Amino acid sequence: MADERFEDHLTYPRARGHEPAGACAGAAGGALCGDLVSIRLRVQDAHVAEAGFDAEGCGATIAAGSAVVELVQDASVLEAALIGPHEVSTALGGLSAGKLHAAELAADAMHRALGAAVRAAAAVPPPQDGQERTLVAMSGGVDSAVAALLATRTGAEVCTVTLELWADDGHDGTKSCCSADAVRGARMVAHAMGLPHLTLDLRAEFRAGVVDPWLTEHAAGLTPNPCVRCNGHVRLDAMLDYADRLGAATLTTGHYARRSDGGELRTAADAAKDQSYMLARLAPASMARLRFPLGDLHKPRVREIAHEAGLPVAAKPDSQDLCFLAGTQRNAFLARHGGLRESPGDIVDAGGGVLGRHRGAHGFTVGQRRGVLTGGGSPAALYVLRTDVRANTVTVGPREALAVKRIPVVDVVVHGDAARVSAARLRSHGVPVAASIDVDAGELLLGAAFPGVAPGQLAVLMDGEIVAGHATIARR
């Protein structure tokens, strides 16, 4: 029977070469493997109304593309979102290990097409029985998997989505949470849990809204925080819009954060994992629809829950670097994508005396000590006090010279009365410092001197455990 199903699809491929009017396309494979499959889907009334495919390479790739077309035809969006390599292989009577790659490529291509079609045209109605549907942001790690698991335990209907944000030749997708590899891994986890999974391609938006500003701000000598920008202006808002298209009232994530009784962003119970700093730019309207099931948990307990449930990512290590830097060095990325190459200049003291040389002022940040001087002097005692990318100088001095009590800020946002601000977090995992905000003067006033405030970074304004607003640190 296996050979008969396979031969049938190979000999009489379904809708090969068909291009439905208004369809969205997805492709997988290419030069590295020699096999390429493209799937085209037209979604109407929350169902796949038409499908077609093209394939190049081995016979298994052609048969897998044909099988996908047959599987998705007339399926609902959420039914199609449950199709993976296993279903494609089964439709062909079971593929050998050597041919399973074809099923993986066909499934990848179908999911890219489905994700684009949902974004362009789908309007999935909410559940009719009054049950809540939630969309879970799946990264492929343990936190998002447990968030999805806990969401199912609330009785909500759960569907999942993974974002594809970045890819280039120097990017190691196996170490990133937003690559094609991560999408595939997250889909495997979601399907193992019996949950529909969709792919949302935000590569263009991520480049324009996160990477390009990060490069521009580095060139200006600032120290940007791309994760704050991504969460506040690109990633979560796009997923909320996607949730609307899928009939989901809420978006559930694996962030370590909480919502206050009034719906405001609040710090997590696990201070060591708290991510409220990275979420501080979210608008109140977005916060109202977010759910954080890990907010009251500590990381060891999250891993215990994953082990108890038999989730395959229970022991998976956490991501450690910026997603688009996976597999490459920061300076190499700045040179390749931003044109910021080595530009030797002087390291000077506060009086202008030359102490050494550097390879580019854009590579330093205020408060930095490591790597300031590579020889001579007493590098352990010197910190970066400021950088000047126009003069290409880096000014260094003792740690006490970094201390400030008044910080100029721009782009100030306060939720409510500015008088509620009682503290500020000046680093992502830093302890809040007593502070008040003078919105008119554009100044953050600290209760005690704080060292190493870097222009370009975010100051998160706090009212106890609640995020009361945010501002961007400007140059002194």
Image (cartoon, rainbow, N blue to C red):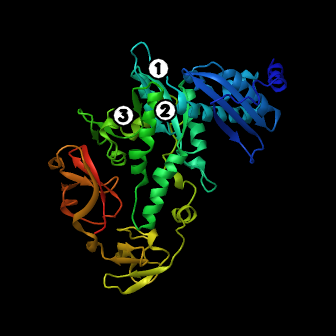
Q: Quadrant of the C terminus?
A: bottom left
What amino acid is labelled 3 in the image? Leu
Q: Which residue corresponds to mark 3?
A: 290
Where residue 76 appears, as percent x and y from the top left, is: 57, 20
Where residue 63 appears, as percent x and y from the top left, is: 78, 28
Element at label 2: helix
Q: Which residue corresponds to mark 1?
A: 125
For marks 3 and 2 on the same chain, the one whose residue lies earlier in the sequence: 3
Where residue 155 appears, as percent x and y from the top left, is: 41, 19
Q: Is residue 174 above or below residue 16?
A: below
Label 3 vs label 1: CA separation?
Answer: 20 Å
What amino acid is labelled 1 in the image? Pro
Q: Which residue corresponds to mark 2?
A: 307
Q: Residue furthest left?
A: 419
Which is more foreground, mark 1 or mark 2? 1
Q: In which quadrant of the rendered view does residue 181 lie?
A: top right
Where residue 219 appears, as percent x and y from the top left, is: 45, 67
Say whether residue 296 is visible: no
Q: Residue furthest top?
A: 129
Element at label 1: loop
Local crowd size for mark 2, using a 10 Å CA cut-off: few (<14), some (14–19), many (≥20):
some
What amino acid is labelled 2 in the image? His
Label 3 vs label 2: CA separation?
Answer: 26 Å
Residues marked 1 and 2 touching at CB (< 8 Å): no
Label 1 vs label 2: CA separation?
Answer: 34 Å
For marks 3 and 1 on the same chain, the one whose residue lies earlier in the sequence: 1
Res 372 label: none
